[in-house]
Amino acid sequence: MKHIITLISILYSINCFSQTPNPDLFQTWYLYDYYSTDDNIHHPVSVITPSISPNLTFTEASLSFSGQGACNSFNGNFTSPFDDVVQFNNFSATLLLCGYSSHTSFEGAYFSFLQSGGGQYFISGEGDNMSLVISTPIFMNYVFGNSQLHSPNFELEQIAIYPNPAKEFVHVNAGQLAISKIQIINSLGQNIKTINDDFETIATADLTTGIYILKMDTSFGTINKKIIKE
């Protein structure tokens, strides 16, 4: 009986450490966001300036991973002890000094994740619209996609303001961007109105004739749009 139990344990161990990862894992993934499930505070990569494109590539033939942080590249090996778990091993990275504090801060968090050992992963979507979420044992979620995000400047420029010139109101079409605040700045640089909600329609009837700037704080950063009040 003792030998049978030992054999079962060995077979179980071999099975646990020889799982085949999801074939969709083997491609390049671009980091979009990371957050803790404890506080749900998100850290979207798109708001980091100057913009970066951190990524993570899994290679099937060698069961290796490689990628780019903010200013340093990295590589290592991985295993899949269970069919929905990725375990990072032998992590190493270059030692360049990032020229921006935002890059240094981000890279510290990203590399800590890669050095922490990995976690459970989930892949959804298809084609060029796939997402990969890796959840670590310390309740951090890292969200990747298999296509690069547009640059923050591109996304911000898609905000449309109309009619312009305006009389009684202007409409703000921000698409998928989340606006948190809008300030109306006059030609002297003075903030004459702050709007904290209902961003789709901005009343302008109380403004005197002239040129104004709508300063909009969004999930991708801040952008200024000029309007003319007739």
Image (cartoon, rainbow, N blue to C red):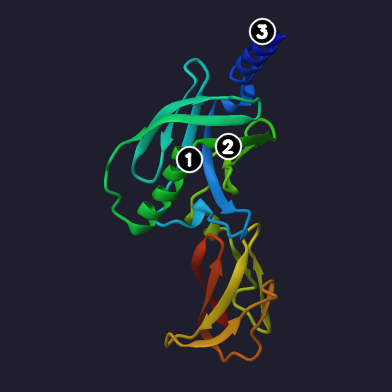
SS assignment at label 2: strand
Q: Quadrant of residue 183?
A: bottom right
Q: Which residue is mark 3?
A: 3
Q: Amino acid at mark 2?
A: Gly
Where's residue 204, x and y in %?
A: 64, 85
Answer yes or no: do the residues labelled 2 and 3 have beta carbons within 8 Å?
A: no
Q: Is residue 167 left or right of residue 157?
A: right
Where's residue 77, x and y in %?
A: 45, 25
Q: Which residue is mark 2?
A: 119
Where's residue 39, x and y in %?
A: 61, 60
Q: Which residue is mark 1?
A: 116
Between the C-alphas of marks 1 and 3, the distance is 36 Å
Residue 53 visible from this viewpoint: no
**Identity of the residue drawn at 57% across and 41% down:** 144
The relative height of residue 173 versus residue 66 in the rendered view (above or below) is below
**Identity of the residue drawn at 48% across and 40% down:** 116
Q: Residues within 10 Å of mark 3 (few under 14, many from 20)?
A: few
Answer yes or no: do the residues labelled 1 and 2 have beta carbons within 8 Å?
A: yes
SS assignment at label 1: loop
